[in-house]
Amino acid sequence: MSLAFSSRRNILIIGLILVSLAPAGCRARQPSPSSTRFGEIVLRAMDRAGIPGLCLTVLDKGCVGPTRGFGIRSRTTREPVTEQTIFEACSLSKPVFAYAVMMLVAEGGLDLDRPLVSYVPEADLERDFFHGKITDERVRRITARMVLSHRTGFPNWREGEGIPLLADPGGKFGYSGEGFVFLQTVVERITGVATNAFVKQRVFDPVGMADSSFVWDDGNEARAASPHSLWGEAGRNRRPTKENVAGSLLTTSRDYALFLLALLGGPGLNEELRQQMLSRQTALTADIGWGLGVALEMAGGGEYIWHWGDNPGFKCFFLVSRKDLSGFVYFSNGDSGLSLAEPLVRSLDGPGHPVFSSSLMANYDSLGSPVFELVKAISAHDLDGGLRGYEKAAAAGARAPTARESCLESLGHTLLGDKRTDDAIKVFEMNVRLFPRSSHVYDSLAEALEAKGDLDAALRNCEKSLALGPGDANAAARVRALREKISRLQRGRSDRSKARQEISP
């Protein structure tokens, strides 16, 4: 299966053209009447998923092909998305930094397999990254190779100041933004320059990414897309003044397409290191693995690189064939933006990509999921009606898109994060009814009930979660914590009651 555009797909791909952006030596495509049809298909899908704006660039046999903008940058200003619109690249930041790191390796400034703590005084790392003393000796084994292949053992993001190791470094795959920030801290000490300057010298300038930066530029204001919540509300742009290589890249889809071509075969990186980047360092399944900074897929006998990006209000995705140097990258400014990844891959290459059935994409709803109708109902202040419709769709089974536990799980936590606690409880209660044998649904309901202050009900659901998953250390800890919290409250009420009795005449 190849993203080199076969004749049966040309009619769709040619329809992507708005402006010819092909570099010198690449044949420009000609406009086609089918572009209107393709636009209509994309806009209908965006409307269903509640995505305000999207920009997509095609790669065709080693050339940057057409770029097309759909929708609007902001529901507040109503300005259109164009090929110049700047988006948050979210986790698509990671491959760009990884490529710059491999350039540093080529220069002899970094060894992929040397422990990172050996490059920086330990006290500096404790201050700048760990925010406390290094107490786990396993940290001293972490290397750049482990970071780039997500095998550090760190969580994706820390909670609070400390950062625990969840697994032995160098072992199993565990996606971690913190690992990339750890490597960023070390690289800044090795090079003596800020990350944006480091990447600009090795990637942005040589590749021609004139509209890309890991920090905010005031000139972005007139071109930047705004983030939009799940409910379609426009938010304020984050304006990073400090680089975060795991997610702060600001770029355009065309700039990113130029980077992808450089990653796959551009000048500046020797072939030995390029092959290491694009070779499986760890396997997730028979078809899905991870190289150094980039995800890998085997589909239809062909090899692909891919990655997704997920920041609040922004979502993005790329998939490119290694053999044909053909594929696409898109950026969107809506919280449901990843629902378009599979439909776009189907349109441009056909079905059969295992990435969409992998655990890595399990938390992102497909375009056919009934959760989108539920989101629309919530936006229209009709949660109860939306839940009835969702339950009906779930009961339809094979006759309709089935409900998934993760759909309601994610939606409920979004509501909880928005302080809509009562609505979150209703969503989690629906998940309990649909998936009564899952321990996670009770744990989430308990979290919402605790936020509301109903500790007894929260404890009952935590205990149910622990009963269904007796090896869950987190559930056990939450049960203990809730029991202690309830006990303290009971003691407090008892003490106050005795005090009132003592002062009564």
Image (tube, rainbow, N blue to C red):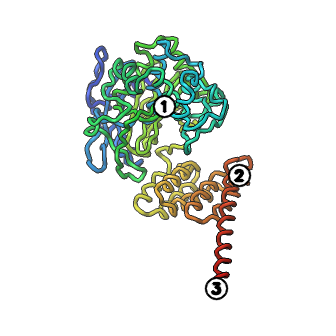
- On the image, the x and y values in percent for residue 460 come to 68, 62
Q: Secondary structure at mark 1?
A: strand
Name the kind of residue labelled 2 in the image.
Ala
Judge by depth and name the residue closer to the eye, 193 or 343: 193
Q: CA distance from mark 1 to mark 3?
A: 69 Å
Query: What residue did someone put label 3 on?
Result: 504
Whether residue 233 sits left or right of residue 289 in the image: it is left
Whether residue 466 sits left or right of residue 421 in the image: it is right
Query: What residue did someone put label 1 on?
Result: 307
Q: Secondary structure at mark 2?
A: helix
Tell me, yes or no, whether the two marked residues, 1 and 3, touch with CB atoms within 8 Å: no
- On the image, the x and y values in percent for residue 257 come to 38, 26
Q: CA distance from mark 1 to mark 2?
A: 35 Å
Q: To which quarter of the image does residue 142 belong?
A: top right
Can residue 41 be seen here?
A: no
Q: Is residue 184 above or below residue 499?
A: above
Q: Nearer the viewer, mark 1 or mark 3?
A: 3
Whether residue 16 sits left or right of residue 131 in the image: it is left
Reading the chain from its start, which is encountered first: label 3 or label 2?
Answer: 2
Judge by depth and name the residue closer to the eye, 446 or 165: 165
Q: Residue at coordinates 66% horizontally, 28% vertically from top-left?
A: 171
Tell me, yes or no, whether the two marked residues, 1 and 2, touch with CB atoms within 8 Å: no
Q: Secondary structure at mark 3?
A: loop
Query: What residue did someone put label 2 on?
Result: 476
Judge by depth and name the residue closer to the eye, 36 or 505: 505
Q: Nearer the viewer, mark 3 or mark 2?
A: 3
- On the image, the x and y values in percent for residue 7 come to 39, 24
Reading the chain from its start, which is encountered first: label 1 or label 3?
Answer: 1
Tell me, yes or no, whether the two marked residues, 3 and 2, touch with CB atoms within 8 Å: no
